[in-house]
Amino acid sequence: MARRLSRRGGNIVTIHDVARHVGVSPMTVSRVINGEKNVREETRTKVLASVEALNYSPNLAARSLATQDSARIGLLYSNPSVAFLSEFLLGILSESSLSGAQLLIESCEGPEGATAALEKMKAAGCDGVILSPPLSDSSRVAKILRDMNLPFVGVAMARPDPLVCCVTIDDYKAALTMTRRLIELGHRRIGFIKGHPNAYASQMRFEGFEAAMKKADLEVDPALVAQGYFTYRSGFDAAERLLAQKDRPTAIFASNDDMAAGAVATAHRLGLDVPDHITIVGFDDTAMASSVWPELTTVRQPIADMAALSVRLMNDQIRAKRLGRPFEPVREIRDFSLIERQSSAPVATGGGL
Amino acid sequence: MARRLSRRGGNIVTIHDVARHVGVSPMTVSRVINGEKNVREETRTKVLASVEALNYSPNLAARSLATQDSARIGLLYSNPSVAFLSEFLLGILSESSLSGAQLLIESCEGPEGATAALEKMKAAGCDGVILSPPLSDSSRVAKILRDMNLPFVGVAMARPDPLVCCVTIDDYKAALTMTRRLIELGHRRIGFIKGHPNAYASQMRFEGFEAAMKKADLEVDPALVAQGYFTYRSGFDAAERLLAQKDRPTAIFASNDDMAAGAVATAHRLGLDVPDHITIVGFDDTAMASSVWPELTTVRQPIADMAALSVRLMNDQIRAKRLGRPFEPVREIRDFSLIERQSSAPVATGGGL
DNA sequence: GACTGATATGTTAGCGCTAACAAATCGGTC
DNA sequence: GACCGATTTGTTAGCGCTAACATATCAGTC
């Protein structure tokens, strides 16, 4: 009858303690905690007061055991920027610690290496997988997952696919907005450094750039468009080509921050001041953007938010699958934001160097 | 009698299924899973075979509920480099998904902001806290935690403190080793850029540098030691001072990668090639080290390992506390490694520029 | 005031696992 | 072969929570 002391460690407050304190049944407390509606307002208030007073917090292990909701979620990533990864993980963690989901992390070398990692996840009993870019854009990975009958959610997926559940921003619109801002600052000759051709986002960003230019009746000079590969070095080289022109651009829009940083290095090497002589902007707002000097103006994705949302979508999807209900894939579009730092400025009135 | 279908979702394999399959009791299976020793070898083998065959994997929620081991671990960080953070989180995650620990992440602005974050953790029922640098080095934070009676583990803590449980590398020895390597490459005039004075690691790294120089009978020219603050910009400026000398150093050892990257930018600006004209090395092996060009030679800490170990230490400590047993704080020293990339080379035979 | 249908609370049992105890089996000794 | 302790296995109960069902309470209606 008496509580077995041997099994208990600390003095953990349980739902029973709260129930006794209020004078209701544990079930009522449970209902309040879970925000169910069929509880009298008065009761609810009293319970919440006791929860506060006793400093109760639910035992997630017990909850997920009881609800059978304990999803095991696999996270698959493939050499993303670490800046992306850390924010991604922060978002995932904050959300999954709320839902009590178990996480299993695997990395792989591009879509080709995904099979092994996914099989490992499947074997470990994962109920679903969250994909970070660039894997989220891989139709190959999507196919593998479908064949495995594993639900998945893609984060920052640029490729539109009505069958895939994902959380993303509008890369096209983001690039368009940034370009518009450069034009607003008086820039007319704007160079563009493209991202890796195998990433769908590269294409969307370039199209957004083109669209903004066209809208402002500005010509996109092919000599001012350079191919890059998302690396610092490729940005460095691309900027060298762009800045070798007789009629130099007054601004360069690089498709990510690493390339923008590389472009800044080239500018410095050529004796050009950023932003006094040339404006250089990036995309992604990775750590690079704010560690380099001058700090980069760039486009920011709310990665942590997006990651957190992906966990929720994953949980919904897993639950739907368990209950045998259909699940309609959704494409959630999040807002990006323009971060203006020191690498951009109005076009030099003096006419350059 | 028959299993209630309504409560079950998928077709999850439990310990009972394995037990039935082998023909033993669930408890025996449990013992095998947990590697207890009083199990006949033959039984163990059969059980393991069934585990494999049925693709069983334990339900962590149930386990931690039963064992009362379900630790809630708080992670406190304060503007570390994102590179550090992502690796730190990866290590934490991989380990805590094994032990089924719940995680709660909070960030704060330096040791001053820690109080609020820690109170939040305490209120949320955290059983212990893992500190990432530079918080792990703060005796202020340590005091707060002790006052709260919350166990904690510091990661990458440079300040020696016999009372604090931590996982770290030997910063002194790492700096010493790197310096020795530079000397081995023929460098004699070696510049040093110190880290932020409020970080204990800065001091240890400098002392390691000094020790190696002294051991090689080389003088540490005060003009070749510059104060930095761990930022790119500070490295940029410090390098400018160092390279303004008449008798320029042939190598610069920066106390972290961001500063090393800044130093590289300065060198480029001055028309110096890295590493042909000057060798520049960093410390930490953050993303910066491999995204910049040329990629940096640097010192690498096994951060993920250290983080994973910190979770284990935390669990041990929490368990000890629950059982009322004493817990001896340990200082675990992990091995660092020298990563040689393109920013270092033997001293130029031609005698510089 | 008896009867409805809603709304609010309580009761029971079980999620999967393991601590503690109980029982069975083993090998060795006199 | 009876007895011992050591080793191996089984049994029972309970971790904290919630789904499902059962019951109680409440308006409102005729």
Image (cartoon, coloured by chain):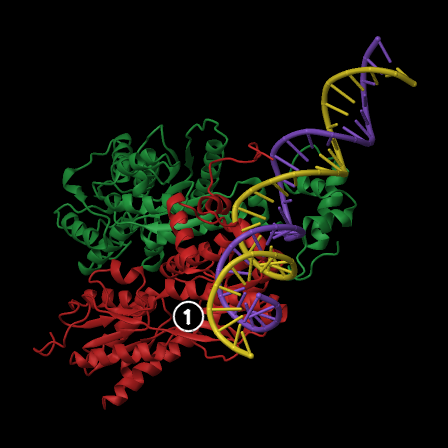
Chain colours: A red, B green, C purple, D yellow
Q: Is residue C11 left or right of B22 when viewed as pictured?
A: left
Q: Which residue is mark 1?
A: A156
Q: Residue at x 58, y 34 (%)?
A: A2
For the C terminus of chain A, the image quarter is bottom left
Q: Is residue B294 left or right of C11 when viewed as pictured?
A: left
Q: Is residue B110 visible?
A: yes
Chain assignment, label 1: A
x, y percent for residue A288: 29, 61
Q: Residue at x 66, y 62 (%)?
A: B6
Above or below, C30 against D21 in this view is: above
Q: Looking at the picture, tell me which residue is in the foreground, B19 or A197.
A: B19
Q: Looking at the picture, tell me which residue is in the foreground, C16 or A75.
A: C16
Residue B72: image quadrant is top left
Q: Crowding at label 1, few (<14), some or many (≥20) Cα neighbours within 10 Å?
A: many
Q: Is residue A23 left or right of A176 when viewed as pictured?
A: right
Q: Looking at the picture, tell me which residue is in the foreground, A64 or A134.
A: A64
For the N terminus of chain A, the image quarter is top right
